[in-house]
Structure formats: C-alpha cells, structure tokens
Amino acid sequence: QVQLVESGGGLVQPGGSLRLSCAASGSLRSIDTMGWYRQAPGKQRELVATISSGGSTNYADSVKGRFTISRDNAKPTVYLQMNNLRPEDTAVYFCNANRVRIGITWLYNIWGQGTQVTVSS
C-alpha cells in the first residue's frame, strides 16, 4: 500500500504565502511524476503543477511565476510553494503520484486526501 499525506493548507490573506507538503509512505521503490491539483467548489479538478523524477516541471498558466513545485526523492516528498496568493486560488489541493513502483509491480494514479487552502481577507 502507498499513501500520500498532504499538509500545510490553511487560511491566508491575499498576497500571502503558503507551503504545501505531500509525503509518500509505504513500501515503495520509486515514484515517477508527482503533482498538485486543485478543486474549487462547483468546479472540476485542475492541474496546478507537476514535477518529474528528474526534476522537469510544468505549471498551469494561472500560477506561473507565483507557485514553485519541488521534490525530495530521498524522503520522498513533493512541495508546493505558493506566493502572492489570490482569492481565486481558494480550493482543496490534492497531491498525485502518477506511477509508483512497489517491488516489481507498479501502482498508478495515487491521490492524497486533499488539504484546504483559503485566500481571503
């Protein structure tokens, strides 16, 4: 079994910053791409940012220049540094691992339970 556990969400004023963390646990050998997605009330889940095992990153246009994704493969943990937050960033943020190696097999599309981020004055 593999679990992804997010932390770091909360309430912040517009212009503020938050750092999300997502720690993977279980008998895993490696993880391919990890990412952050978000879902606002009444909206579909959307991509925020992804990072490959080699460190290549991809961002949604709406967060470019404000958010930074990074990962520590040794832990393994993925982070999302969010700066200059806006009210429209309010959502539940979910961590994702697209492919996880367990022994000689693979598990696909693993999700965390989500963490709430609220940007409001």
Image: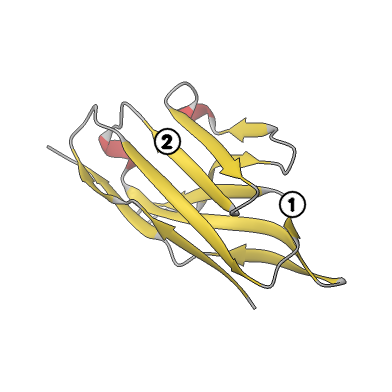
> Which of the two residues, 27 or 88, is positioned nearer the viewer here?
27
Crowding near the residue tagged with mark 1, few <14, some 14–19, many ≥20 C-alpha atoms within 10 Å: some
Q: Is residue 41 visible?
A: no
- Going 55% across and 52% down the picture, which residue do you hit? 77
x and y percentages locating residue 47 in the rendered image: 55, 44
x and y percentages locating residue 59 in the rendered image: 57, 32
Q: Is residue 35 above or below residue 15?
A: below
x and y percentages locating residue 29 in the rendered image: 75, 63
- Going 37% across and 58% down the picture, which residue do you hit? 115
Q: Is residue 38 left or right of residue 59?
A: left
Q: Quadrant of residue 101?
A: bottom right
- Image quarter where the C terminus lies is top left
- Mark 1 vs mark 2, CA separation in Å: 20 Å
x and y percentages locating residue 1 in the rendered image: 65, 78
Which label was assigned to residue 5? none
- Going 35% across and 50% down the picture, which residue do you hit? 91
Of all residues, the one furthest to the right in this rendering is: 104
Which label was assigned to residue 81? 2
- Going 58% across and 42% down the picture, which residue do you hit? 71
Secondary structure beneath dot 1 equals loop
Crowding near the residue tagged with mark 2, few <14, some 14–19, many ≥20 C-alpha atoms within 10 Å: some
Q: Say what amino acid the circle numbered 2 marks.
A: Gln
Count up the numbered dots: 2
Q: Is residue 113 above or below residue 17?
A: below
Q: Quadrant of residue 19?
A: top left
Q: Which residue is mark 1?
A: 32
Q: Nearer the N terminus, badge 1 or badge 2?
A: 1
Q: Say what amino acid the circle numbered 1 marks.
A: Asp
